[in-house]
């Protein structure tokens, strides 16, 4: 579960309150660091797309096989329409956090916790994509051998994507 449970959320807030300076410098630095990390992850997604294209060019994944093509199209759709366009919006949200003047430190902490919580979901997504991708990269035969098995889910499922969207809604991110 990516969303903080109530007790742990309060514990995290208290810890942040105890450790932050009066001028919010610590939280501002934390937001800047998250922004930099998200930019790195956006580059990772771009690199994954280049690798898929390279596999196509070297015929390690044949785009002429209908089932392979469907898997490839699903993967490309996830990268292009969801996360490649989503990450800049998350970065913009962090920018707004940094530039905003919340009424109290607690307001700022709540916003930072939401961003941290959402980023946890992004990290989980990237981990899943990387696992699936490198499994094929290490042994392309796995993909070919499993093409006859309709139950094989090579890349993040529709259910997984729906969980990410729910995570965004639960954290009040207006980025869909």
Image: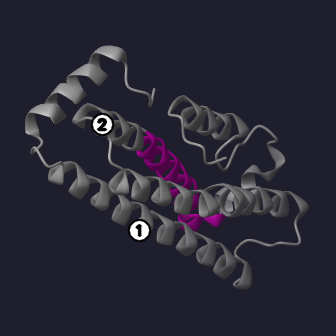
Residue at position x 56%, y 54% in the image: 129
Q: Position of residue 57 (x, y in %)?
A: 72, 84
Residue 86 lies in quadrant = bottom right
Are there few (<14), some (14-19), or many (20+) residues within 10 Å of tag 1?
A: few
- Magenta stretch mostly in which secondary structure? helix
Observer able to see residue 45: yes
Q: Which residue is mark 2?
A: 103
- Residue at disc 1, secondary structure: helix
Q: Position of residue 104 (x, y in %)?
A: 25, 35
- Residue at disc 2, secondary structure: loop
Q: Which mark is residue 40?
A: 1
Question: Measured along the vertical axis of the image, is residue 149 above or below residue 41?
Answer: above
Q: Position of residue 114 (x, y in %)?
A: 40, 37
Magenta segment boundaries in residue numbering: 118-140
Are there few (<14), some (14-19), or many (20+) residues within 10 Å of tag 2?
A: few
Residue 135 lies in quadrant = bottom right
């Amino acid at each position: 579960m990516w969303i903080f449970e109530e007790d742990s959320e309060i514990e995290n807030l208290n810890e942040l309150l105890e450790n932050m300076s009066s001028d919010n410098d610590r939280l501002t630095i934390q937001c800047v660091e998250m922004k930099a990390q998200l930019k790195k992850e956006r580059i990772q997604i771009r690199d994954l797309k280049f690798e898929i294209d390279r596999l196509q060019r070297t015929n390690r994944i044949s785009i002429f096989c209908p089932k392979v093509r469907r898997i490839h199209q699903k993967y490309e759709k996830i990268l292009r329409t969801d996360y490649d366009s989503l990450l800049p919006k998350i970065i913009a949200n962090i920018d707004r956090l940094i530039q905003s003047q919340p009424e109290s430190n607690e307001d700022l902490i709540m916003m930072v916790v939401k961003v941290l919580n959402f980023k946890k979901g992004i990290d989980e997504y990237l981990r899943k994509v990387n696992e699936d991708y490198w499994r094929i990269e290490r042994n392309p035969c796995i993909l070919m051998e499993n093409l006859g098995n309709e139950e094989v889910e090579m890349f993040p499922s529709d259910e997984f994507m729906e969980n990410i969207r729910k995570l965004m809604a639960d954290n009040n991110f207006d980025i869909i």
